[in-house]
Image (cartoon, rainbow, N blue to C red):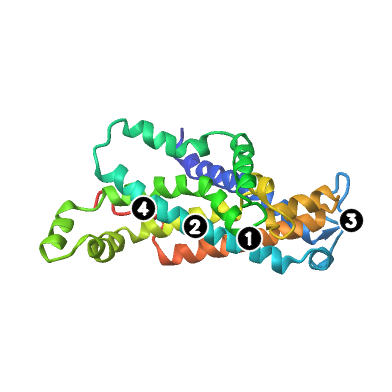
Amino acid sequence: MNRRWRSPLRIALALLFVAFITLPFVMIVLEAFGTGWFGMRLLPAGWTLKWFGWAFATVDLGTVMWNTVVIALIATMASIALAIPAAWMFARYALPLRGVLIGLVLFPRMIPEITFALGVAKIFYAFHLTNTRLGIGLSHVILAAPFAVLVLISPFEGIDSRLLEAGSVLGCNTPQLWRRVILPLALPGVIAAALFSFLASYNDFVLTLMVYGPNTVTLPVQTYLSIGNGYTSVAAAISLLLLIPSLVFLMGLMRMVEPEKLLGGLKGA
């Protein structure tokens, strides 16, 4: 191919990719702020903020947002607590059938969520954990923990064993070694694992739908309920409210941690 066409072609492909990724979000924004958008009209006939007013008038969005955030924080803390020892075991020990074990950890992410959501709901109903923030948060661990384990394996693999030996020689016991050596070195990976765990819970719909109740409605469930009631523009407004915290959280993380370290940790350092 002629070199003079390579650069325009790359730019065109990059723009096409960006458009493919962002166009659904553009549609949400147009639906949330537009009015009179029917038929083959390319853009809404007018612009309004009334859908947000309707969202706040018909839905207790403060409670819904609080439920969503609290549940996500519970899921994140529980996932990280489980993922750190599991990822350390996979990263630092020569386990038999290591690939099979990692596959079992990731299994919930490899199958349709609805296939195990029914089983989770059955268990949680038996233990009276439905319609509670704690119960829903714990159910989300099934989705969030695999992300956390996968992200943390690489940072733990990349920690030089000589640093651990040096810490032991200097008098660190196991808890001190974790607090002063391991966790500080793996901090970018821990932050990334926490982020992915939080977002996995924050954005979950199917599993939440099976175990939520009137007191524990989350933003994804409320969006679904609004669509089911025929209020698509109100649902778009709620979807935008759901999207903004995710973007703010991600941008804040990018400022704290270099993007290339989010998944790789210190591997190869």
Q: Which of marks 3 and 2 precedes in the sequence?
A: 3
Q: Is residue 30 visible?
A: no
Q: Are marks 2 and 1 in contact (CB under 8 Å)?
A: no
Q: Residues within 10 Å of mark 4 (few under 14, many from 20)?
A: some
* Residue kind at label 1, given as amino acid type: Thr
Residue drawn at the location 79% of the way across and 67% of the way down: 56
Q: Is residue 109 above or below residue 36?
A: above
What amino acid does circle 4 point to?
Ile
The one of 32 and 198 positioned closer to us in this rendering = 198
Q: Left or right: where does residue 103 sit relative to residue 200?
A: left
Q: Which mark is residue 59?
A: none
Q: Secondary structure at mark 2?
A: helix
* Residue carrying label 1: 68
Comparing 169 with 58, the one in front is 169
Q: Nearer the viewer, mark 3 or mark 1?
A: 1
Residue behind mark 2: 76
- Residue 101, given in percent of the width and then of the height, sits at 37, 35
| Frontmost residue, 25 versus 134 | 134
Q: Which residue is mark 3?
A: 36
- 73 sits to left or right of 231: left
- Residue found at x 66% / y 64%: 65
Q: Residues within 10 Å of mark 1 (few under 14, many from 20)?
A: many
Residue 5 vs 233, above or below: the answer is: above
Amino acid residing under circle 3 = Gly
Name the mark nearer the viewer: 2 or 3.
2
Q: Earlier in the sequence, mark 2 or mark 1?
A: 1
4 or 3: tag closer to the N-terminus: 3
Residue type at tag 2:
Thr
